Image: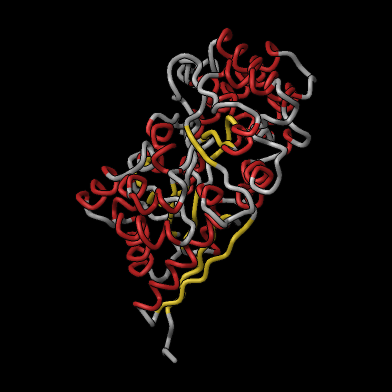
């Protein structure tokens, strides 16, 4: 038994994509470094999103974070600015191998606050067998999607929980050629906003029961365990469901539909690994984080154990694509043209208010004009608060 073991505690989200690769990498790292113990814990997506950045940094050495929280991280400075602990050449290596904007999504106010270890965006998922059995092809445009949705209610169902409905709204805007938040006085021009909301409303009307409370995991679980949903045009991708034997039924994935400009503008997701400023064993945490984010681990142990790497080398690797029925190659174009949300300190609070607004619109409690006006007010207030902070 080792004397004075050095223990790191980590927190991630509760799904095989989020937890399994970290358990596997921790086990291997500790085998190579017997004096080290790494303990990973997991919370549900909702619990994970509700945690205070300061509280998480106080209780954990390693925290898997979403990039919209980076503004808060920079404000609180409760995680290590990793550019002060890794050489520029090292970080440049990660940046060049990063999928899409995964690496820069964790850079804010002059510092790199996390290393990208997981890349994701809203993608399309489908049951190839169901589409084939009913004589349909995979949709490529939004008109194709609506035609498919008319086959029967629920045949086409996106993830439309309040947060995911907001993400869909953002994606629709960007896909229509007007990425949100390019102006300081409005979220999006009114004509584009109205069209995006209408598309979202029509899509919700064709969706299956429970769609308005379903997050991506819920949709992929339903698609992989029943024959109710054949096509999901927008939800954050999970390569696990494209792996044979993971669930009873195989889900295939591909590009989001096009509004005439190609499959661009999908809202970027993913996850980065941050190190608490309170970490007592910084050197070990830095070594572990660097190894996990590196392309060798990403394309082997990380993806083999159920992870969804952030390394482009891994996404292009034949082995990774063989494991996932071509998931990475099929969705990489979406990741490379994905849209990056703002990350100022007040954006996460704006998101919480905005998702309620879009949810009320989908429930028919307000029209498109009222919805856009409220979103604009929430955004300008968030920017005003940010200016006061600065």
Q: Is residue 286 left or right of residue 219?
A: left
Residue at 59%, 24% (x, y): give it: 169
Residue at 37%, 66% (x, y): give it: 282
- Residue 149 image offset from top left, x and y in percent: 67, 23
Image quarter where the N terminus lies is bottom left
Q: Is residue 295 above or below residue 284?
A: above
Q: Is residue 34 left or right of residue 214?
A: left
Q: Closest to the observer: 330 or 371?
A: 330
Q: Quick one: which residue is furthest to the left in this view?
A: 89
Q: Closest to the observer: 240 or 45?
A: 240
Residue at 34%, 60% (x, y): give it: 297
- Residue 349 image offset from top left, x and y in percent: 60, 36
Residue at 47%, 63% (x, y): give it: 22
Q: Closest to the observer: 154 or 37?
A: 154
- Residue 16 image offset from top left, x and y in percent: 56, 57
Q: Quick one: which residue is furthest to the bottom in this view?
A: 1
- Residue 96 image offset from top left, x and y in percent: 26, 42
Q: Is residue 329 above or below residue 170?
A: below
Query: How are the colours assigned in the image?
Result: secondary structure
In the rendered image, which quarter is residue 360 located in? top right
Q: Is residue 328 above or below residue 155?
A: below
In the rendered image, which quarter is residue 127 located in? top right
Residue 68 in sight in this render: yes
Image quarter where the C terminus lies is top left
- How many discs mark residues in the rendered view? 0
Residue 344 in sight in this render: no
In the rendered image, which quarter is residue 331 located in? top left
Q: Closest to the observer: 265 or 274?
A: 265
Q: Is residue 314 above or below residue 166?
A: below
């Amino acid at each position: 038994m080792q004397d004075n073991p050095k223990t790191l505690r980590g927190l991630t989200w509760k799904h095989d994509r989020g937890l399994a690769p970290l358990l596997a990498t921790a086990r291997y790292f500790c085998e190579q470094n017997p004096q080290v113990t790494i303990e990973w814990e997991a919370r549900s997506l909702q619990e994970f999103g509700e945690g205070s950045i300061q509280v998480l940094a106080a209780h954990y050495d390693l925290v898997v974070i979403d990039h919209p929280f980076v503004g808060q991280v920079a404000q609180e400075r409760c995680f290590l600015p990793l550019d002060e602990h890794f050489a520029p050449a090292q970080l440049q290596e990660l940046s060049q191998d990063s999928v899409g904007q995964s690496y820069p999504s964790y850079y804010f106010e002059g510092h790199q606050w996390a290393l990208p270890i997981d890349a994701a965006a809203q993608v399309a998922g489908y049951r190839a067998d169901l589409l084939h059995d009913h004589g349909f092809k995979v949709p490529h445009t939004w008109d194709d999607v609506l035609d498919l949705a008319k086959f029967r209610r629920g045949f086409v169902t996106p993830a439309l929980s309040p947060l995911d409905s907001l993400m869909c709204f953002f994606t629709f805007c960007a896909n229509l050629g007007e990425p949100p938040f390019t102006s300081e006085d409005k979220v999006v021009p009114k004509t584009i906003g109205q069209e995006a909301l209408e598309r979202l409303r029509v899509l919700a009307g064709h969706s299956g029961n429970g769609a308005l409370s379903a997050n991506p995991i819920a949709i992929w679980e339903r698609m992989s365990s029943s024959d109710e949903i054949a096509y999901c045009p927008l939800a954050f991708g999970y390569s696990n469901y494209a792996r044979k034997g993971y669930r009873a039924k195989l889900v295939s994935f591909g590009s989001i539909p096009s509004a005439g400009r190609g499959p661009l503008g999908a809202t970027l997701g993913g996850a980065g690994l941050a190190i608490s400023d309170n970490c007592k064993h910084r050197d070990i945490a830095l070594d572990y984080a660097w190894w996990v984010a590196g392309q060798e681990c990403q394309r082997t142990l990380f993806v083999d154990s159920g992870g969804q790497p952030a390394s482009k080398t891994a996404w292009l690797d034949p082995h990774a694509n063989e494991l996932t029925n071509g998931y990475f190659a099929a969705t990489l174009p979406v990741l490379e043209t994905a849209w990056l949300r703002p990350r100022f300190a007040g954006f996460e609070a704006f998101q919480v208010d905005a998702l309620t607004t879009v949810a009320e619109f989908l429930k028919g409690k307000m029209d498109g004009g009222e919805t856009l006006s409220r979103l604009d007010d929430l955004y300008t207030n968030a920017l005003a608060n940010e200016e006061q902070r600065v």
